[in-house]
Image (cartoon, grey):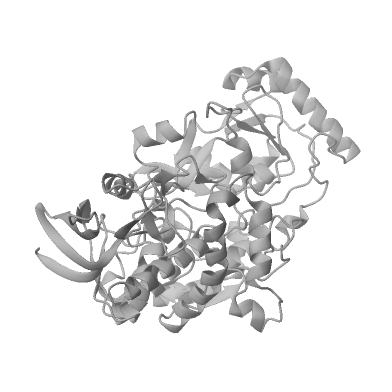
Amino acid sequence: MDDAYDAVVLGSGAAGLTAALTAAVSGLRVLVLEKTDRIGGTSAMSGAGTWIPANHHAEAAGIADSPAEALEYIRAAAPEGWAATEDALWQRLVTASPAMLRFVEAHSPLRFRLTPEGDPLRNLPGAKPRGRMLSPLPLSRWRAGRFAFRIRRSTIPEIFTYHEAVETDLYHHPYRTALKLWPRLAWRLLVNSRGKGTALITGLLRGCLDAGVRIELSARAVALQQDETGAVTGVAVEQRGRQRTIQARRGVVIATGGFEWDVALRAQHFPGKVDYLGSPPGNAGDGHRMAQAAGAALAHMDQATLTPAVPVRHEGQLMARPVPFHTEPNAILVNRHGVRFVNELVFNIGEAMDARDAAGQPLHLPCWVIADARLLHRLPPARWAAKDDAGWLHSAASIPELAQAIGLDPVALEATVARYNAACAAQKDADFGRPSAADAAASGDKRRRGGLEALDWAPFLAMPFNRSILGTKGGPRTNDQAEVLRPDGSVIAGLFAAGASSANPLGTRGVGTGTTIGPYMAWGHVAGLRLAQRNA
C-alpha cells in the first residue's frame, strides 16, 4: 500500500464532506478523493435547499415537530410497497437529520436559517406548514483557503441566497430584484461571499480542513481493494498519470454522485427523452461500478431528481438551469398525445411526467409545455434559454401550426387548449383540479405563480418538458448504518455509500424541496459515525 488512512471518502459533495467531517471530528485520519479538478459535485451546483425535520432552528422559532411526525409524513408520502425495504432507513433518517444539523453547525462555519416553505404534500399526515426547510447563510469563499477558487460553479447565480430566490420575485423580475438587493450584493462581491451550494460546500470544506481532513483533486478511484473475506480495505486511484493504492483501515465511503452522464446506463434505466443534465460531467457511475464489482446489490436505479429546467450554456455545453416555467398561469403540460395528464402545479411533477408502463417504458414522453407569448414577457430566464439553445423554443401563429411543428396531433392539441381556455373562463379546472389562484403549497415561494389564464395571445409557444436530471438516485443498497449490502442482505464490511451514489430510500418522489441535500448529508453523517465505531 502506498498510503494509509483510517477512512477514504470518494467524492466531495455534501454527502462526502459530511461523512469526512464526522469521521475526522471523531478522531480518524481521513482522505477525500475528488475525481475532477473542482470541489463540491452536484451539491455545489444546487440551490442548497435543505429538508431537515425536527431541527433546532424550528424549535427555536416555536415550531413544534418531532421525528415521529416526520416519519408519519414520509410513510404517507412513499410510493406503494416501499415501506417493506425502506422503513428502517426512514426511521434512521428522521433521527439522524436533526443530529447532523447540530453537528455540522458545531464543527463548521455553516449557519442555516429557516425558509418560509412548508411541506408540499400538505394534506398528508405529519406534514408541517413551516419549519423543515432551511438553507445556509452566505459565506466568503476565502474560508475555503487554497480551495477558494476550486469550488464548482453553478448554472444558477450563487450571488443570491436560496432565501432571496424564494422570498423575492427574482425569477420574474431579476433586474428589479438585483437593484433592490444591490447593497448586500455589492458587499458579497467585495468579500467574495456567495450563497446556495457555494456556501454549503465552502462551510463543509472549511470544517473538514480544520478537522485535519486531506483533500486531493483529479484523483479518480478505479477499484476497491478487498481482503480474503470480501471486506473492503482500500482503493486503487489514478492521479496525474500514476496509479497508487490507498489503505482504508476503517473503510471507504462511496459518495461519487449519480450515473446520469454515462450514456449507456442512463439509456438503460431512463429510456426515452432526456432534455438536459444539471450535474457535473464527472457523475458517470464510477462508484456504482466499483460497488457492484465488490459484490453490492444495486437498487432504485430508475429513480432520479427530475426537475423543470431551461437550457443554459455552462462551461462550454448546454446544461439544465432549474426554473419552474411550467407553473405560469398561461402554461399547460401535454404528453405525446397532445393532451393534459396532470395538474401542472403538483409538487412531484417530474414523477408524473416520468410515469412508466409495466415494461418500464415511459407513458407520456415526449412532453411539452404549451404557452402563449406572454410567458416570454413574464419570465426572463425563458428568454435567455431561447438564446442559449436555438432549438429549445418553438413558436407558431396558431395552435394547429404549433402542433405540426413539434410532431403532435393538431386536432388533439387544439381541443386540449380549447378545453383549458374554457376552464380558465369558468375559473375551475374540472379535469385535474388545478387551483384558480396560486397554489397554497407554494406559499412563501414566489418562483411558482400558478392560476388559470387562457392561452390566447399569439404567437403560441412550445418548450420540451422531459427529464432534466439533476442527479440519479439509484445505487448500492445500504442498511440504516449506511453500510453497503450484498444481494443476500449481508454487509460488505468496510464499504459505505451516501448521497446520489446510494439507493435513495425516498426516490424520485420528494417530500420537500430539499429532499436531496438534507437526507444526503444525514447519510454522510451516519456513515462517518459508523466508521468511527468500526474496529474501535
Task: Look at the image and tell me whether residue 168 can be seen.
Answer: no
Q: Quadrant of the N terminus?
A: bottom left
Q: Residue at x 63, y 58 (%)?
A: 74
Q: Quadrant of the C terminus?
A: bottom left
Q: How many numbered marks, from 0 up?
A: 0
Up-down: is 164 above or below 364? below
Query: Which sits in the foreground, 366 or 173?
Result: 366
Would residue 211 be found to the left or right of residue 110 on screen?
left
The x, y position of residue 100, in whole percent, is: 48, 74
Up-down: is 103 above or below 90? below
Q: Furthest residue to the right? A: 426
Query: Which sits in the foreground, 151 or 41?
Result: 41
* Residue 87 location, quadrant: bottom right
Q: Residue at x 58, y 18 (%)?
A: 407
The x, y position of residue 530, in whole percent, is: 37, 70
Up-down: is 410 above or below 291? above
Query: Which sits in the foreground, 83 or 263?
Result: 83
Task: Look at the image and tell me whether residue 239 can be seen.
Answer: yes
Would residue 244 be found to the left or right of residue 148 on screen?
left
The x, y position of residue 420, in whole percent, is: 80, 32
* Residue 289 location, quadrant: top left
Would residue 248 be found to the left or right of residue 26 on screen?
left
Q: Residue at x 52, y 33 (%)?
A: 392
Q: Residue at x 78, y 46 (%)?
A: 451
The x, y position of residue 323, in whole percent, is: 57, 49
